[in-house]
Image (cartoon, grey):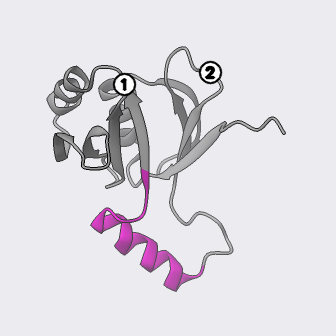
Amino acid sequence: MDITIHTTALPHVDPDASLAFYRDVLGFEVRSDVGQGKMRWITVGPAGQPDTSILLAPPAADPGVTEDERRTITEMMAKGTYGWILLATRNLDATFEQVQAGDTEVVQEPTEQPYGIRDCAFRDPAGNLIRIQELR
């Protein structure tokens, strides 16, 4: 089998704030932006990697999601426990400084983990956990 990861999804509550974070702070390209108001689906991805994207989507937009499920999703997003993604960079310290300068909520400064990686963590405007690991 020849399978790749093409797109993963993260929820947003404020599409403009999320767009600014991924475009201006992380430096991702905007590949598409469809919809209007809070009902926007925005696809972003790292420059030079056209086959890998993140879809920033309104949470619980699926008509099959119940009101109780929407409430649970909203509560989990507010706590930062609903969405997360792992990214990687060759220069963790420089990346950390650049992301931190974007007035981003720092969860963890660069740290050597006991399981053999060095990483840091932030929250995006929707509360999603963004972990960035250093490539070695």
Q: Is residue 98 above or below residue 65?
A: above
Q: Nearer the viewer, residue 37 or 13?
A: 13
Quadrant housing residue 132: top left
> Does the magenta-highlighted stretch encompass residue 76?
yes
Query: Residue 130: x and y, percent?
Result: 34, 45
Q: Is residue 66 above or below residue 132?
A: below
Quadrant housing residue 54: top right
Residue that appears at 38% across and 22% down? 27
Quadrant housing residue 20: top left
Mark 1 secondary-structure assignment: loop
Q: Nearer the viewer, residue 77 or 93?
A: 93
Task: Please state the extent of the stretch shown in magenta in the rendering.
Answer: 66-84
Real-space CA distance between mark 2 and mark 1, rounded to the nearest whole angstrom: 23 Å
Residue at which label 1 appears: 136
Residue at which label 2 appears: 50
Residue that appears at 42% across and 43% down? 86
Residue that appears at 21% across and 24% down? 98
Q: Is residue 97 above or below residue 115?
A: above
**In this rendering, does residue 39 appear at all?**
no
> Does the magenta-highlighted stretch encompass residue 95?
no
In the displayed orientation, state which residue is furthest to the top: 48
Chain-order first, disc 2 or disc 1: 2
Q: Nearer the viewer, residue 22 or 116?
A: 116
